[in-house]
């Protein structure tokens, strides 16, 4: 009951706040924008000191010992010709016991695996090792129009912590029809904390990579898509990755969903390459969440970026609370002269915490830089 009254209070409170916002003057807008920037700066200071709101999740989830660093104790081989333990990736995942005590490596030999795979929450420390992203691919074809929700379209979904994938391609082959509805089609969803991806490819159109929740590291990977193709509320570092844009009308590289001031999430892209062809209409990001946060640093942009850079998702209020920035980016699409007034070129101090593994508390869990 107390909870109910609490919720009613909060509802009333927020309706008051939002009706006040309707009549807010220009100076109030400016002051809430400067509050957003001050809050961002204090968050940067905290991240710089590598504090994290998630810090205790791994410790409190029942693990013992230094499991994240344990060398693989079990290897399962998947081979379509029958030369391994199993012919499908699903059988290999099923063979890992719930609450497995040891790390498991699933080695996937070359082939196109037509499957949909979920790694459940309680199967920790699985490494999926492909034979090279050009030769090992897992693929399916599901759009939100087929399954009912975006979440359920993923070809590969990870809910477990300490999942790693290497040298493998994840694809959702559902096509994009420009102007069509419900075409969200996720190749990979990562909802587990401490997930890392090295040398992988994520192929899709709309909503290719659902970077949903938790701390994630993407290195030397290729992400292909058109609309909102890296999206969700994760806290992730993308290093040396290629984001390849397929033609669409007014798509967006990112749709980060941070929902409140207190949430410690956002996407950082460092040394990445934005490639593709077509008109200069692609946004760097649009504000799926009102506090959306995305930074691009030292990245090269082809001539495909919409000169205004960022989109408020048809909600001007979000311009006061999002944090969108570039730092020393280059290439024809990187020119900031026509960017929206609510995006920034970061200072050295602001950019510094985004550049290192400390941003995702990598010292706690990343075993390979
Ligand atoms: C696996 O990926 C890494 C990049 O993280 C790359 O250096 C390596 O050459 C890849 N190996 C294969 C077999 O593709
Ligand atoms: C936090 O930062 C300090 C100094 O920069 C470093 O020694 C320590 O390993 C970091 N801890 C984590 C968990 O990243």
Image (tube, grey):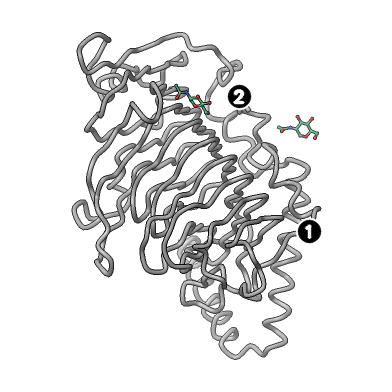
Where does the image place residue 243, in percent across and percent down from the top left? 48, 49
Residue 289 is situated, as x and y percent measured from the top left of the image, at 50, 63
Establish if 83 lies above or below 6: above
User: Percent from the top left, x then y, of residue 168?
Assistant: 39, 29
Q: Is residue 56 visible?
A: yes
Q: Eyeballing the image, is 132 above or below 20?
A: above
Which image quarter is the C terminus in? Answer: top right
State the mark number for residue 347. Answer: 1
Q: Are marks 1 and 2 in contact (CB under 8 Å)?
A: no
Q: Describe residue 352's horizontal placement relative to residue 302 as left or right.
A: right
Horizontally, residue 364 falls left or right of residue 87, namely right
Q: Identify the residue shown where x is 39% and y is 52%.
A: 225
Dot 1 alpha-carbon crowd within 10 angstroms: few under 14, some 14 to 19, many 20 or more: few
Quadrant in the picture for residue 65: top right
Q: Secondary structure at mark 2?
A: loop
Q: Is residue 49 above or below residue 58?
A: below
- Among the two numbered marks 1 and 2 on one chain, the one whose residue lies closer to the N terminus: 1
Please name the residue shown 73% across and 40% down the image.
50
Residue 6, visible in the rendered structure: no
| Alpha-carbon span between mark 1 and mark 2 | 29 Å
The picture places residue 324, in percent across and down from the top left corner, at 62, 63
- In the visual, does 320 lie left or right of 214? right
Residue at the (37%, 34%) spot, across then down:
169
Is 57 placed above or below 265 here?
Answer: above
Residue placed most toward the observer, 173 or 291: 173
- Disc 2 crowd, CA 10 A, few/some/many (<14, 14-19, 20+): few
Q: Secondary structure at mark 1?
A: loop
Q: Is mark 2 within 8 Å of ligand 1?
A: no
Q: Nearer the viewer, residue 325 or 4?
A: 325
Q: Which mark is residue 368?
A: 2
């Amino acid at each position: 009951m107390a909870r109910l009254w609490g919720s009613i209070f909060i509802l009333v409170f927020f309706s008051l706040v939002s009706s006040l916002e309707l009549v807010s003057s220009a100076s109030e807008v400016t002051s809430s924008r400067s509050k957003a920037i001050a809050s961002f700066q204090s968050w940067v200071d905290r991240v710089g000191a590598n504090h994290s709101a998630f810090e205790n999740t791994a410790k409190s989830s029942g693990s013992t010992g230094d499991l994240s660093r344990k060398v693989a104790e079990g290897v399962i081989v998947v081979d379509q010709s029958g030369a391994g333990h199993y012919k499908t990736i699903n059988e290999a995942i099923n063979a890992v016991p719930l609450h497995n005590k040891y790390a498991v490596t699933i080695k996937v030999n070359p082939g196109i695996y037509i499957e949909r795979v979920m790694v459940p929450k309680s199967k920790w420390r699985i490494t999926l090792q492909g034979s090279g992203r050009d030769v090992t691919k897992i693929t399916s074809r599901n759009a939100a129009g087929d399954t009912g929700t975006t979440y359920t379209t993923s070809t590969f979904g990870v809910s477990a912590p300490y999942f790693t994938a290497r040298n493998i391609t994840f694809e959702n082959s559902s096509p994009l029809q420009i102007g069509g509805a419900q075409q969200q089609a996720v190749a990979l969803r990562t909802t587990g904390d401490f997930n890392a991806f090295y040398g992988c490819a994520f192929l899709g159109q709309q909503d290719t990579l659902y970077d949903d929740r938790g701390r994630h590291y993407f290195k030397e990977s290729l992400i292909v898509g058109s609309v909102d193709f890296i999206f969700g509320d994760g806290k992730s570092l993308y290093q040396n990755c290629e984001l390849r844009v397929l033609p669409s009308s007014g798509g967006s590289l990112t749709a980060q969903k941070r929902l409140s001031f207190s949430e410690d999430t956002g996407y950082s892209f460092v040394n990445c390459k934005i490639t593709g062809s077509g008109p200069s209409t692609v946004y760097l990001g649009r504000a799926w969440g009102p506090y959306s946060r995305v930074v691009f640093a030292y990245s090269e942009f082809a001539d495909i970026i919409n000169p205004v850079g960022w989109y408020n998702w048809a909600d001007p209020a979000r311009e006061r609370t999002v944090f969108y920035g570039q730092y020393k980016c280059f290439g024809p699409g990187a020119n900031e002269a026509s960017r929206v007034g609510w995006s920034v070129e970061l200072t050295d101090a602001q950019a510094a915490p985004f550049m290192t593994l400390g941003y995702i508390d990598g010292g706690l869990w990343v075993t390979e830089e």
